[in-house]
């Protein structure tokens, strides 16, 4: 895995289709349903990803899938884990998995005439939306010519095609196809996430167990709207003589790439380096790794990241650079 | 995906097809073929046990559609069925489902399949309903 100062995603698609206004007798209830049978998406490793690229600002994940239908479960795992890591709920993750499964099955069955090929998936977050792009070379089709299934028709008279596309449009807020013989085809799907109410709300409380040490308890979410407050808090503490900081983040439900920028800035601050300009902080995130060789002394530690935040750290390659501990005492001891 | 078959006795003999694993474009054919083989071998009442199916895509629904059509009585009148489905009174008499997961149920609802496929939460109730 490598980090790359990526180009910004989130461009808008003029050919977007909207699912609004369409008759939908059996619409899925997207709101807040519990999920007792959530799929096992924790900890499973994708056996053979061709490559994975992570870029920041926005945090964007890319993975290529080579082969055929046997890749569907890998695609679902990748999409579900990423959707969840980028702030989606279990419902969001399920919707994204099913929509991408249907889209990829159509590509393998119809666009790849020998049924084998490469699908490149890119996923990123644009404000409250999750954007998923599927890029491939293959046969084009006219999505408007795929009849919408008549859900009231007698079951024995139903056409068996078109259900996959129908699911994609039901599950996503936006589904758009672009076909290009030369550059390849791109399917872009967007979903408005069921964002927790605490999004944008960050509460900090400070403890000073020693003159040179501080524990910052973080509740809520660390995102683009508030990450500078966290950096400012660390700067204040540093000015008071603190050179060891423990971030107790068990109550931090979501950390965006801006939150990672804050972690980077605080690490540099504690090393006595000038904190990078927050505006382009993500571009120097990778320098954390480079700068580490000289001194392995770690002055920033985390306590109890949630599995979601832990995955974001892992995806960004920060997990090995900023250690996590199960409790505040062991984190402070490790930094002493 | 793993498939196994058992027999149960209600008012009539019921064939139970137990499915373990996801039903997607990779696996639906195996599932559908097994069900069609059972029907060809004389099964008239089929219960599909979904208790160990975490996930089903539209490929699984297409398979259920095909299986339903194979089991449908030739005497069944299409108009009567359609009216029954619309009124919510029709439930598939020969093909029933046992305990779909919350996610599989969402898929069934999104496609409207829950409007005519008879779904039961316990094996006993399912077998007794045939």
Image (tube, rainbow, N blue to C red):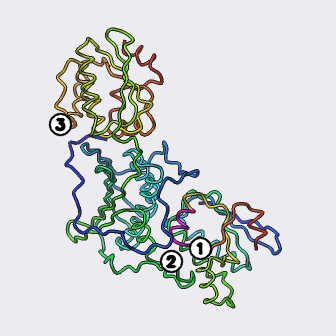
The magenta stretch is B105-112
The residue carrying mark 1 is B115
Question: Would you place residue A73 above or below residue B73 in this image?
Answer: above
Question: In this figure, which residue is indicated by the disc labeled 3?
Answer: A279
The secondary structure type at the circle numbered 3 is: helix
Dot 2 crowding, Cα within 10 Å, few <14, some 14–19, many 20+:
some
**Which quadrant of the view contains residue B6?**
bottom right
| Residue named by callout 2 | A151
Position of residue A270 in the picture relative to residue A306 (left or right)? left
Indicate the secondary structure of the residue bearing disc 2: loop
Task: Work out whether mark 3 precedes mark 2 in sequence or the reverse, and give the earlier one.
Answer: 2
On screen, residue A6 above or below A14: above
Q: Chain of mark 3?
A: A
Q: Residue at x 27, y 23 (%)?
A: A233
- Looking at the rendering, which quadrant does residue B75 occupy? bottom right
Circles 1 and 2: CB distance less than 8 Å? yes
Q: Is residue B108 left or right of residue A5?
A: right
Is B10 magenta? The answer is: no
Residue at image location 47% in from the left, 59% down from the top: A30
Q: Nearer the viewer, residue A293 or A42?
A: A42
Question: In the image, what residue occupies the spot 24% across and 54% down?
Answer: A10
Residue B106 on the magenta segment: yes
CA–CA distance between discs 3 and 2? 50 Å
Q: Is residue A91 left or right of residue A188?
A: right
């Amino acid at each position: 895995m490598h980090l790359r100062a990526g180009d910004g995603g989130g461009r808008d698609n003029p050919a977007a289709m909207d699912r609004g206004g369409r008759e939908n007798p059996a619409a899925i209830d997207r709101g807040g349903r519990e999920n007792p049978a959530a799929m096992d998406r924790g900890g499973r490793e994708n056996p053979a990803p061709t490559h994975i690229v992570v870029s920041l600002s926005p945090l964007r994940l890319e993975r290529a899938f080579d082969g055929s239908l046997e890749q569907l479960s890998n695609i679902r795992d990748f999409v579900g884990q990423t959707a969840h890591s980028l702030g989606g709920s279990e419902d969001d993750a399920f919707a994204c998995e099913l929509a991408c499964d249907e889209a990829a099955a159509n590509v393998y069955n119809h666009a790849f005439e020998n049924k084998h090929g490469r699908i490149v998936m890119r996923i990123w977050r644009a404000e409250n939306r999750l954007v998923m792009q599927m890029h491939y070379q293959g046969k084009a089709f006219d999505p408007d010519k795929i009849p919408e299934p008549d859900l009231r028709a007698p079951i024995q008279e139903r056409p068996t095609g078109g259900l996959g596309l129908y699911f994609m449009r039901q599950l996503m807020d936006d589904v758009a196809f672009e076909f290009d013989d030369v550059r390849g085809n791109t399917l872009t799907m967007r979903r408005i996430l069921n964002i927790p109410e605490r999004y944008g709300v960050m509460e900090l409380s400070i403890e000073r167990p020693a003159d040179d040490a501080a524990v910052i308890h973080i509740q809520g979410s660390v995102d683009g709207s508030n990450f500078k407050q966290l950096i400012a808090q660390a700067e204040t503490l540093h000015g008071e003589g603190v050179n060891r900081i423990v971030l107790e983040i068990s109550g931090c439900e979501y950390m965006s790439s801006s939150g990672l920028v804050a972690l980077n800035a605080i690490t540099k601050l504690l090393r006595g380096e000038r904190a990078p300009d927050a505006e382009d902080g993500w571009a120097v995130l990778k320098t954390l790794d480079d700068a580490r060789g000289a001194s392995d002394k770690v002055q920033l530690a985390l306590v109890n990241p949630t599995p979601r935040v832990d995955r974001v750290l892992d995806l960004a390659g920060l997990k090995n650079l900023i250690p996590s501990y199960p409790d505040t005492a062991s984190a402070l001891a490790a930094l002493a | 995906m793993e498939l196994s078959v058992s027999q149960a006795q209600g008012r009539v003999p019921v064939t139970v097809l137990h499915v373990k694993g996801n039903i997607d474009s990779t696996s639906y054919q195996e599932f559908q073929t097994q069900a069609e083989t059972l029907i060809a071998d004389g099964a008239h009442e089929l219960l599909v046990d979904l208790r160990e199916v975490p996930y089903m895509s539209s490929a699984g629904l297409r398979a259920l559609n095909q299986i339903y059509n194979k089991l449908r009585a030739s005497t069944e009148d299409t108009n009567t069925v359609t009216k029954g489905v619309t009124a919510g009174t029709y439930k598939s008499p020969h093909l029933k489902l046992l305990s779909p997961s919350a996610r599989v149920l969402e898929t069934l609802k999104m496609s409207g399949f829950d409007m005519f496929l008879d779904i039961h939460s316990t094996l006993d109730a399912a077998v007794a309903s045939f």
